[in-house]
Amino acid sequence: MSLFQRIEKDFVAAFKAKRTEEVAVLRMLKAAIKNKEVDVRRALSDAEVLEVVAKQVKQRQESIEQFRTAGRTDLVDAEERELRILQAYLPQPLTEAELAAVVEETIQATGATSMKDMGRVMQAILSAHAGRVDGKVASALVRARLSA
């Protein structure tokens, strides 16, 4: 079953169970996926659907940060609930230790020696572990390793 089919199935189940918050989040996610399909004029692959989910997760995380700085705990709680629903569709992220090992391995494989090679290393990491790596964390690790 594709990721989009799983989202569809979960949407129907949530709708029948009258879980309104989950229905709203999944409806918004389905709309984002459909918009992307219209943009590229074809059905999306699982990897592309995963990118859309990751983008939605990132939007929620940014909203949570902004609501916290504004002192809106009610909105923070709502966004965190939405975030948990969306994260169910993402693969398990790499742990800090796993990510450090991946960074080291990729630097060895690409033969990177300086900060000039950072783009190549980051591209290799993000393409090989799409959806499982936080770009900011990976970037910090690569930068620390290459500047050492």
Image (cartoon, helix red, strand yellow):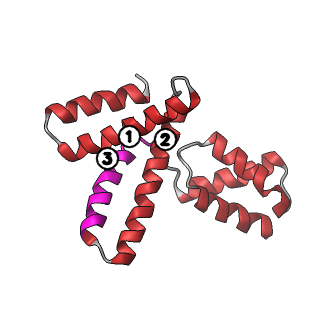
Q: Secondary structure at mark 2?
A: helix
Q: Quadrant of the N terminus?
A: top left
User: Pointer 3: what residue?
Assistant: 85
**Tag 2: residue type?**
Val
Q: Position of residue 111 (x, y in %)?
A: 85, 50
Q: Is mark 2 in CB contact (under 8 Å) with mark 1? A: yes
Mark 3 Cα within 10 Å, few/some/many (few <14, many 20+)? some
Residue at point 63%, 58% (across, down): 138
Return the disc, 2 or 3, that comes first in the chain's sequence: 2
User: Pointer 1: what residue?
Assistant: 29
In the rendered structure, find residue 52 and report the number of the disc placed on it. Answer: 2
Q: Is residue 91 visible?
A: no
Q: Secondary structure at mark 1?
A: helix
Q: Nearer the viewer, residue 55 or 41?
A: 41
Residue at point 64%, 46% (across, down): 126
**Tag 3: residue type?**
Ile
Q: Nearer the viewer, residue 17 or 34?
A: 34
Return the disc, 1 or 3, that comes first in the chain's sequence: 1
Horizontal relation, residue 40 to residue 64: left or right: right
Q: Quadrant of residue 17?
A: top left
Q: Position of residue 30 (x, y in %)?
A: 37, 35
